Amino acid sequence: MDTWKIIVLFLGAFTGGMSVFFFKGDNHKTLKLVLSFSGAFLFGITVLHLIPDAYHGNDNYVGVFILIGFLFQIFLEQLSEGIEHGHIHKPGPEHFAFPLGILVSLCIHAFLEGMPLAEGNQNQLVYGIALHHVPAAFALGTVLLANKQGKNKTIFFIVLFAIMAPAGYFFSNELSAGGIGNLQKYYGRIMGVVIGIFLHISTTILFESSSDHKFTVRKMIAVLLGMGIALGAFFAEL
C-alpha cells in the first residue's frame, strides 16, 4: 500500500472542505472548472483503465454489477441531493438541521471510490478522485455551515469525509491481497459496482456542472484537458 496515495486522497477532500472558510459567496467558477476537469478525467480513466481491467477475469456478470453501481449511485443521490457533483442546496431560514443523509451518502460514495486504487497501476485515478473531492468537500462544508453547524463540528465532519477514500483504498488493498475473508475472487464484481458509480458521476458532472447544461469555452477546455491527460497516460503505459 502506497502512503502517498493516502496523503493525496486525504488532502484533496480536506483542502476542498477547509476552503469553505476562505471563499464566500455562491459563484465559484474555478471550482466548477475543477469539477469539469475531474469529471472528464474520471470518465477517461474509467473507460480506458477500469472497464478493461474488470473484464480481465472473463466474468460475464461484471456488466450486471456495473449497472448495479450505476443504480446505486442514483439511490445515493436521493440522500446527498447531488452534492458530490458540487451542487449546493441551502436550507430555508426555518429548516436548519444536521444533514445526516448527505454525510452518510458522501462517505459511502468516497469509500467506494477509493477501492479501485489497489488494483494495478491506478496512479492517474488517485489524482482524478482527489480533484473530484475538492468541490464535493467544499459543498459539504457549505451545507454544514448553512445548517448552523459550528466551525469545529464542520471541520470534524470534513475530516471524516476526507478519510473515507483512503479507508476504501486500505480495505480494497487487503481484499485484493486476500487478507479479508475469501472475497478476492469477487474483486472484479466489486470493481464493476465502482465503475457504475464512476460512470454516473462523471457523465452527470459533464452535463450538469454549468448553467443551462451548455458547454462554455472554458468548460470545453477543462473537459478536453481532463480527457487528454487520461489518454496521454493510457498511451504512455502501452
Image (tube, grey):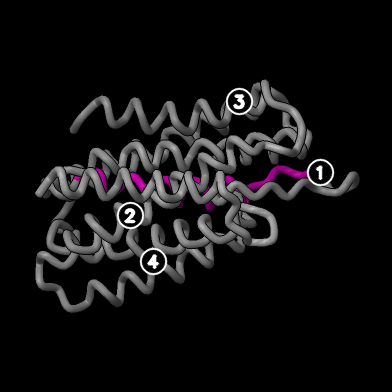
Compared across the picture, whether 108 is left or right of 140 comes to left
Can the viewer see residue 214 in this picture? Answer: yes
Percent position (x, y) of residue 72? 45, 66
Determine the secondary structure under disc 1. Answer: loop
> Mark 4 or mark 1, which is nearer the start of the sequence?
4
Q: Is 203 or 219 nearer to us in this picture?
A: 219
**Circle 3 residue:** 19
Which of label 2 and label 4 is nearer to you? 2
Which numbered dot is residue 26? none
Mark 1–mark 4 contact, CB under 8 Å? no
Q: Main secondary structure of the magenta part?
A: helix
Q: Is residue 98 magenta?
A: yes
Q: Residue furthest front?
A: 217
Q: CA distance from mark 2 to mark 1?
A: 39 Å
Q: Which residues are magenta?
A: 96-118
**Circle 2 residue:** 44
Which of label 2 and label 1 is nearer to you? 2
> Mark 4 or mark 3, which is nearer the start of the sequence?
3
Which residue corresponds to the image point at 46% horizontal and 71% vertical from the top-left?
71
Which of label 3 and label 4 is nearer to you? 3
Amino acid of disc 4: Gly
**Circle 1 residue:** 96
Which numbered dot is residue 69? 4
